[in-house]
Image: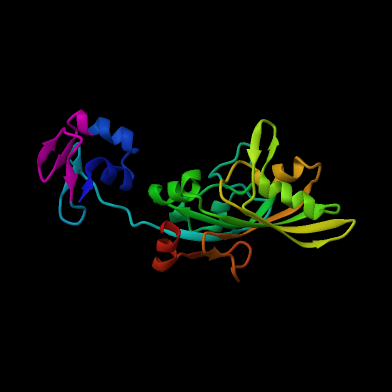
């Protein structure tokens, strides 16, 4: 049994808050009986729910892993006319939303879903779902810089912190660093390096929770398995 407003939100009728207003206004019926109390619960498999007489059916929940290439935005439409990740997906999946973002010049693993609870769990800092990145950075990176990252640095009025930071290679021209982050702030990896006067030349996300990018090729997608979904929510 689930709360009626959650059932309506999961079905794509409206947000949870807007669904509460639909209930209070007497526009929802369960098994032919008008419902106006917010505490009402329904059985999604057996109860018949209608909005102004129209039946409501739950949408099948989808969980998709995509290897985002560089040069795409994660929104459905872009004001600048740039291509979006939705051009890589079947047209009938246009209702999915990305779980977090990768900026235009970043690449790698990103999830898309129509499950709002799943998105919240993966993006809200309180759940601390780790994301792993590989960053190619201009110039030589010294171990001391990575120690500052794991201690936390202040930049542009915000504190940025890596859970782990590992130097893969370093030359005078370029360094490659693996970073493990848990908060998911806007452009967090790039701003960590900007705080030290360094520019990220290439950024790839290679893991979210226990799910690795693996052999998924750029521009390709796959659906997540039930055990993978459970591991992300565990």
Provide residue 129's location: percent of width, then percent of height: 51, 53
Up-down relation of residue 220 to residue 107 (above or below): below
Residue 198 visible in the current orientation: yes
Provide residue 102's location: percent of width, then percent of height: 61, 49
Provide residue 55's location: percent of width, then percent of height: 20, 46
Provide residue 107's location: percent of width, then percent of height: 65, 55
Give the residue displayed 23% in from the left and 44% down from the top.
Answer: 3
**Residue 99 vs residue 142: left or right?**
left
Residue placed most toward the observer, 22 or 209 = 209
**Residue 76 vs residue 174: left or right?**
left
Give the residue displayed 44% in from the left and 49% down from the top.
Answer: 121
Q: Hey, which residue is sitting farthest top in the picture? A: 25
Give the residue displayed 40% in from the left and 62% down from the top.
Answer: 230
Type of colouring: rainbow
Q: Hey, which residue is sitting farthest bottom in the picture? A: 215
Give the residue displayed 21% in from the left and 53% down from the top.
Answer: 44
Which residue range is magenta in the image? 23-42
Q: Is residue 39 magenta?
A: yes
Up-down relation of residue 10 to residue 36 (above or below): below
Tell me which corner region of the image, top left, top right, bottom left or bottom right, holds residue 234.
bottom left
| Total numbered labels | 0
**Residue 232 vs residue 10: left or right?**
right
């Amino acid at each position: 049994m689930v709360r009626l407003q959650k059932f309506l939100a999961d079905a794509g009728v409206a947000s949870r808050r807007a669904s509460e207003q639909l209930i209070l206004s007497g526009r929802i019926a369960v098994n032919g009986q008008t419902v106006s109390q917010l505490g009402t619960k329904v059985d999604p498999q057996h109860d018949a729910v209608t909005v102004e007489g129209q039946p409501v059916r739950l949408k099948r929940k989808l969980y998709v892993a995509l290897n985002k290439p560089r040069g795409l935005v994660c929104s459905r439409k872009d004001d600048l006319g740039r291509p979006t990740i939705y051009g890589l997906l079947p047209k009938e999946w246009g209702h999915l939303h990305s779980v977090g973002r990768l900026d235009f010049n970043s690449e790698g693993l990103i999830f898309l879903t129509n499950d709002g609870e799943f998105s919240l769990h993966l993006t809200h800092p309180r759940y601390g779902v780790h994301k792993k990145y590989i960053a190619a950075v201009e110039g030589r990176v010294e171990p001391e810089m990575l120690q500052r990252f794991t201690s936390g640095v202040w930049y542009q009025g915000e504190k940025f912190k890596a859970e782990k930071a590992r130097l893969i290679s370093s030359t005078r021209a370029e360094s490659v660093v693996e970073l493990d982050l848990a908060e998911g702030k806007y452009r967090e990896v790039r701003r960590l390096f900007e705080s030290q006067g360094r520019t990220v030349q290439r950024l790839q996300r290679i893991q979210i929770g226990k799910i690795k990018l693996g052999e998924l090729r750029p521009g390709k997608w796959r659906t997540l398995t039930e055990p993978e979904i459970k591991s992300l929510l565990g």
